[in-house]
Image (cartoon, rainbow, N blue to C red):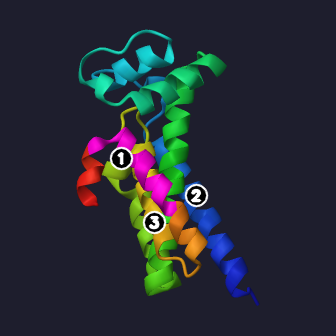
Amino acid sequence: MIGPLNLRLASAAALAVLATLARTLGLPLSRHRFDGHEGDYLRAFQGELVEGSTRLYPLLAGLYAGLGQLTQDSRALLALNIAAGVLTVLAGAALVERRFGPRAALLTGLLLALSPAHVFWSASAYNVALPQLLLVAACALGVQPHRVLRWLGVPLYALACGMRAELALLA
């Protein structure tokens, strides 16, 4: 018989695989076009100056520029956001599990893993996936019974607001 912890780990692993497949098979990295704000973030990644409204998000542009110091393969930008999207699926499921139980958590994870909007935005280099991960992780930590874990959500929320200023409106 599978114990509750093993079942949760198996569910999380299945959600992670499903979310990764949806983002990589559904939107192949090789066919991706960097346009609009994504083009600005690509230029930051390549070490160029960022123009226009993208300058309002220096934290994310700086993160991408730092990643560009490690590699110049633009697929790394997409892989980072895909990983953030997959982790958001898991964090969302963890958040719901704490309040509503494992079945609701699995359903939430499946909906996030396969939601066309979530798949699309977490398979792009736009400024959506990483702030969303930080916000959902902050909420997931905020419902934990241990005070220290709850407080760890505060800097995650602050970082999310630094990447998407409108998230501060949620405070």
- For label 2, the residue is 16
Which kind of residue does numbered mark 3 sit on?
Gly
Mark-to-mark CA distance, 1 and 2: 26 Å
Q: Is residue 75 above or below residue 85?
A: above
Label annotation for residue 49: none
Dominant SS in magenta: helix
Q: Residues within 10 Å of mark 2 (few under 14, many from 20)?
A: many
Going by the image, does 165 lie left or right of 44?
left
Q: Residue furthest top?
A: 48
Res. 71 in view: no
- For label 1, the residue is 161
- For label 3, the residue is 92
| Picture quarter with the N terminus | bottom right
Res. 113 in view: yes
Q: Is residue 93 above or below residue 131?
A: below
Which kind of residue does numbered mark 1 sit on?
Cys
**Mark 3 vs mark 1: which is more N-terminal?**
3
Stretch of the chain drawn in magenta: 153-165
Q: Secondary structure at mark 3?
A: helix
Q: Residues within 10 Å of mark 1 (few under 14, many from 20)?
A: many
